[in-house]
Image (cartoon, rainbow, N blue to C red):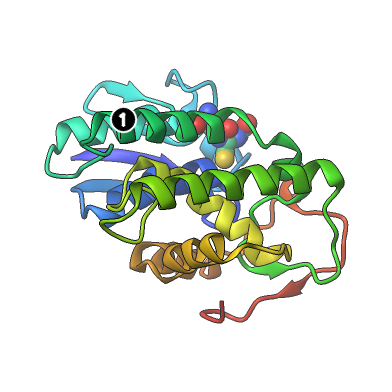
Amino acid sequence: MMKLLIGNHNYSTWSMRPWLFVHYHELPVEVICMELFSDDLLQTLEPHFSDGKVPLLLDGKFEVWDSIAIMEYLGERFPESASWPTNREARAVARAVSAEMHSSFSVLREEAPMNIRKRFPGYELSKQALKEVSRIQNIWRHCRNNYGANGPWLFGDFSIADAMYAPVVMRFRSVQVDLDETSQNYCNTINQCESVIRWIDQAYQEQGVVDADEIDWPGESIPPRSV
Ligand SMILES: N[C@@H](CCC(=O)N[C@@H](CS)C(=O)NCC(=O)O)C(=O)O
């Protein structure tokens, strides 16, 4: 069976993406979760090519080490699990917004790391981060309004693009932002997705605290299942 190595559910955004894809499509992949930056994780990753990073997919001796590449590979290995929209134009846009997630929004990522168990009342994002939040909402509106008629996801059916943006919705659990109606509805779709709920539950079963992903602001625990 293939193996997917991931980091903490509470913090590891890049792990969450391919894990969601695996869980949503009920793929036969064994998940191995290890604490980010721990010696165990570093030792486990040592013989592999991922440069000490998770997620990492092992298919026998073959390795794939990047979240989008892992999801595309799984989509090809299990063709019944649609990875991209079938319409050519929608697919191009889905790839563009997924690549944009991969390469952008660095200020938001820095100021509001994913921290599923905690929220930070009164914490204000900088102007630059809010500009990125605004761009994310533009993207969500663009996808939902132009390509989302067949279902609640960005391109109607669940695709890699939704897995890419799910951790952003987790950041908005912790840090309050004003969202337009379409974006709020999309966040509700993510928050109500059974696979996302399962990921969140697993974050609550962990104890580990990763200092690098904690922000310097008084936080409070979010009670489990209370989004
Ligand atoms: N571009 C990679 C990013 C992977 C990544 O940065 N993973 C983080 C965890 S979310 C990590 O392993 N960090 C450990 C480190 O940088 O030492 C992907 O999309 O999978």
Q: Position of residue 176 (x, y in %)?
A: 73, 66
Between 60 and 138, the one lying in front of the other is 138
Residue 170, quarter of picture? bottom right
Q: Position of residue 186 (x, y in %)?
A: 47, 61
Amino acid type at image mark 1: Glu
Q: Is residue 30 above or below residue 123?
A: above
- The single residue placed furthest to the front in the displayed view is 146
Q: Position of residue 11 (x, y in %)?
A: 60, 52
Q: Secondary structure at mark 1?
A: helix
Residue at the disc numbered 1: 89
**Residue under the point 39% across and 46% down:** 146
Quarter of the image where ligand 1 sits: top right
Specify whether residue 178 is in view.
yes
**Residue under the point 42% across and 66% down:** 189
Q: Is residue 97 above or below residue 175?
A: above
**Residue under the point 81% across and 72% down:** 121
**Residue under the point 85% across and 59% down:** 124
Between 182 and 133, the one lying in front of the other is 182
Is 127 left, or right, of 47 in this rendering? right
- The single residue placed furthest to the left in the displayed view is 80
